[in-house]
């Protein structure tokens, strides 16, 4: 079985190791939290290498004023070594030096900084300075580093930075956000029209599978907001999303969000070419049963147009008396009506 969020974590761990995600596909059967912990351990191990050497350099920096250390860092050490030295300095000392550095040099250093150190450093730097560095990272398309800023930047500068980028850029940052809560923070900042541009970017992205995997890491409310925007797209985009959700087997993550949508939104998501495939609808029905979403499933079925209703006669799940009995029983007081509706839809009703 595949766990929610696991496939996205596989993509992230592959990025850390500079490998193709397919080499780690077996990890999709491991809970996302376990893969995330492994990724953090790998990052920590990376920054432990040669730590003693950088500690010796850090000791030398304490012998001169912060302004002098900053000048040496920019003119002699370079951003990569400077970042490693900053990683072993006490936070207070690192901040004193950072205040004498140019935003450009901080942006050069940022991709090489130990991610565990970014939060404490950012917390003590001025918002305007953080925005200047963030602008440079976005301009350079340093998505991984920009994503590491999401959980630690104050709300006001984060809102300003998010306002600078379009849907494609937001998608890249969302893909590399470290924790599900980081994703929520970005989604919460987006009004519906900006969320729509994110959906459009997902549709044309070369990383469509990974983009749709985001629904496995988001809250039901955020998934519902995204799906509401999907429902407003042109038919080819809607079909692409539905087909991708099916192909990566993410129905159990998508259905709770779909359950929060108004009933009038369902036809736009249900009546696409992908759902004419009996196997697709069968998987939707099976996922709905796993989630115990019988009433929602009935709403979905009655939202289908004539072409899709005709295709239901070939759906294996609706020919299973046990499955049909569950659908009828789950609705409660309207069992007779539901039975009649399902019979009309081609289900195996005794």
Image (cartoon, rainbow, N blue to C red):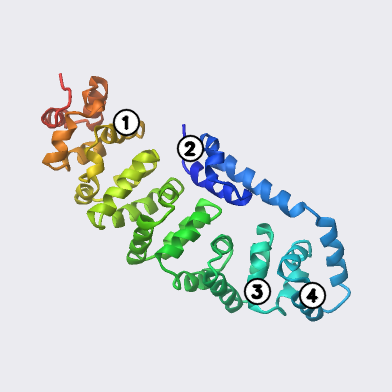
x 32%, y 49%: residue: 241
Which quadrant of the figure has residue 282? top left
Instruction: State the image coordinates of residue 246 (x, y, percent, origin top left).
Output: 34, 40
Above/below status of 324 relative to 24? above
> Element under label 2?
loop
* Residue annotated with mark 1: 286
Residue in front for this viewpoint, 167 or 31: 167
Which quadrant of the figure has residue 112? bottom right
x 77%, y 80%: residue: 71
* Residue annotated with mark 3: 125
Q: Residues within 10 Å of mark 3 (few under 14, many from 20)?
A: some
Q: Nearer the viewer, mark 1 or mark 3?
A: 1
- Residue 240 bears which disc, if any? none
Report whether residue 47 is seen: yes
> Element under label 1?
helix
Above/below status of 80 relative to 282? below
> Element under label 3?
loop
Report whether residue 123 is seen: no
Q: Nearer the viewer, mark 2 or mark 3?
A: 2
* Residue annotated with mark 4: 76
x 23%, y 23%: residue: 325
Q: Tell me which numbered mark, 2 or 3, is placed earlier along the sequence.
A: 2
Mark-to-mark CA distance, 3 and 4: 24 Å
């Amino acid at each position: 079985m595949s766990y929610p969020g696991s496939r996205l974590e596989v993509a992230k761990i592959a990025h850390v190791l500079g490998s193709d995600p397919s080499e780690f596909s077996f990890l999709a059967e491991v809970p996302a939290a376990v893969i995330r912990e492994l990724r953090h351990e790998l990052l920590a191990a990376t920054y432990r290498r040669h730590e003693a050497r950088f500690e010796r350099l850090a000791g030398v920096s304490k012998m001169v004023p912060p302004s002098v250390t900053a000048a040496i860092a920019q003119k002699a050490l370079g951003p990569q070594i400077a970042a490693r030295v900053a990683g072993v300095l006490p936070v207070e000392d690192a901040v004193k030096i950072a205040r004498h550095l140019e935003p450009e040099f901080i942006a050069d250093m940022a991709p090489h900084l130990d991610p565990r150190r970014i939060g404490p450093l950012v917390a003590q730097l001025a918002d305007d300075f953080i925005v200047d560095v963030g602008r440079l990272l976005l301009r350079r398309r340093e998505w991984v580093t920009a994503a590491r800023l999401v959980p630690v930047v104050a709300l006001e500068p984060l809102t300003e930075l998010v306002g600078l980028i379009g849907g494609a850029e937001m998608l890249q940052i969302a893909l590399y956000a470290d924790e599900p809560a980081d994703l929520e923070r970005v989604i919460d900042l987006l009004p519906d029209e900006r969320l729509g541009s994110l959906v459009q970017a997902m549709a044309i992205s070369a990383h469509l599978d990974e983009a749709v995997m985001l629904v496995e890491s988001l809250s039901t409310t955020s998934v519902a907001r995204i799906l509401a925007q999907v429902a407003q797209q042109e038919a080819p985009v809607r079909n692409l999303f539905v087909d991708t959700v099916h192909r990566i087997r993410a129905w159990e993550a998508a259905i709770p969000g779909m359950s929060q949508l108004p009933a009038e939104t369902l036809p736009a998501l249900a009546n696409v070419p992908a759902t004419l495939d009996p196997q697709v609808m069968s998987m939707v029905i099976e996922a709905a049963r796993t989630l115990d979403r019988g009433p929602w499933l009935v709403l979905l079925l009655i939202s289908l147009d004539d072409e899709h209703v005709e295709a239901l006669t070939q759906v294996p799940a609706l020919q299973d008396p046990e499955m049909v009995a569950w659908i009828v029983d789950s609705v409660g007081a309207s069992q007779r009506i539901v039975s009649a509706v399902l019979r009309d839809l081609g289900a195996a009703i005794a």
